[in-house]
Amino acid sequence: MLLVLLLAACTSSPQPSARPSPSASTPSRAPSPTVSASSPAPDARGSGNAVTIAFGGDVHFEGASRSALSGGLAAITPALSAADVTMVNLETAITDRGTKQPKDFNFRAPASAFAALRRAGVDVVTEANNHGMDYGLVGLRDSVAAARAAHFPVVGIGLDADQAFAPWRTVVKGQRLAFIGATHVLDSNLMSAWTAGEGKPGLASAYEEARLLASVRAARATSDTVVVYLHWGAERHTCPIDRQPDIARKLADAGADIVVGSHAHVLLGAGMLGRTFVDYGLGNFVFYARGGLGAQTGVLTVTVTGRHVDGYRWAPAVIGGGVPRPLSGTAAADARKRWAALRGCTALTA
């Protein structure tokens, strides 16, 4: 039945336009079936022009995925660059210095990562995750400096809390878009040190709930579409854990139109929470996954007209050699069916 809904629904085609010019807001396609969403009041449509926003999951450049630094994302680039704006989770520090933090896995990549992402069609990333400060304060400062030097928008990190919680803003087709990043996943022994504060560099922590919601409300007041990308969930859990629906509802009530996230290293379900689109888990994307559920990935594209979610579509892919490769034919149809079935434990609607 879910597959029938996916195949039957449709959305109006957005007007073609150039992608937004990337600007540093550092802490300051293969077609597929689309699901339609219900309509809010007409005055919530902003300029009245539809905008497409694409999302990918967790990205680092360790192990096999290091090949992406020299153009290894060519296969997935058409799906990413077809959208007006594309966002992923950059789950690594951008540095060649610093000290490894006391944790099981530490990721870092050179500043050329931003050029690789831009070539692939990515416009903005969040570094609010449990690897954003893997090389300590030195690594965080290097990440901020590298993003600024590359004029590449990064959210979720900063030299203080105001920067970490600040949105990246851009205008597409007359629509004012705001993108916010925060993490709900922090190692308990590092949480205090990694959380941005007054005059304190760090990450935007979703445990600082009042500040996160205030950031969303402020963005809502001056934006036509508000997007929140969270690092959340439990590893290898294909259903949301209790705190995910709770914070999703609070973000929706604060004015978020799209709430997406990653961390679990597997895909979770997506759908509508009232008028807000929610995806509980985008899985790995550029990662050293070695088959199984961890290698199942894809590009999520959401079409919005202001506050109205016109529809969304899933273009499935599989990770091979550390990078995502789009599926086609029967393999893609089967993957979309599996993705749609993940909604069953989310309480979201199609």
Image (tube, helix red, strand yellow):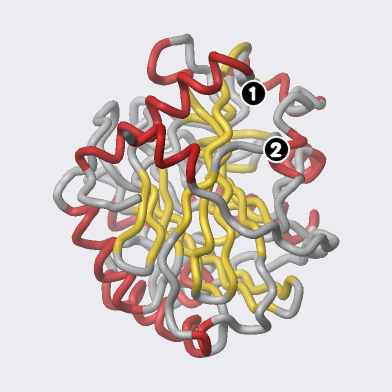
Look at the numbered discs 2 and 1 and tell me whether their residues touch, using CB distance below 8 Å: yes
Point 48% across, 10% down: residue: 290
Any part of residue 2 in sight: yes
Q: Position of residue 145 (x, y in %)?
A: 70, 57
Q: Label 2 sits on what residue type?
A: Ala
Q: Is residue 172 above or below residue 35?
A: below
Compared to residue 10, the image places residue 323 above or below, namely: above
Which residue is at the front of the view, 347 or 40?
40
| Number of residue marks | 2
In the rendered view of the protein, which quadrant contains the N terminus? top left
Residue at image point 30% right, 61% down: 273
Q: Which of the numbered marks, if any, corresponds to residue 179? A: none
Disc 2 marks which residue? 79
Vertical position of residue 220 compared to residue 93: above or below = below
Q: Position of residue 78 (x, y in %)?
A: 77, 36
Circle 1 is placed at which residue position? 326
Q: Nearer the viewer, residue 304 or 133?
A: 304
Give the mark nearest the N terminus, 2 or 1: 2
Q: Amino acid at mark 1?
A: Pro
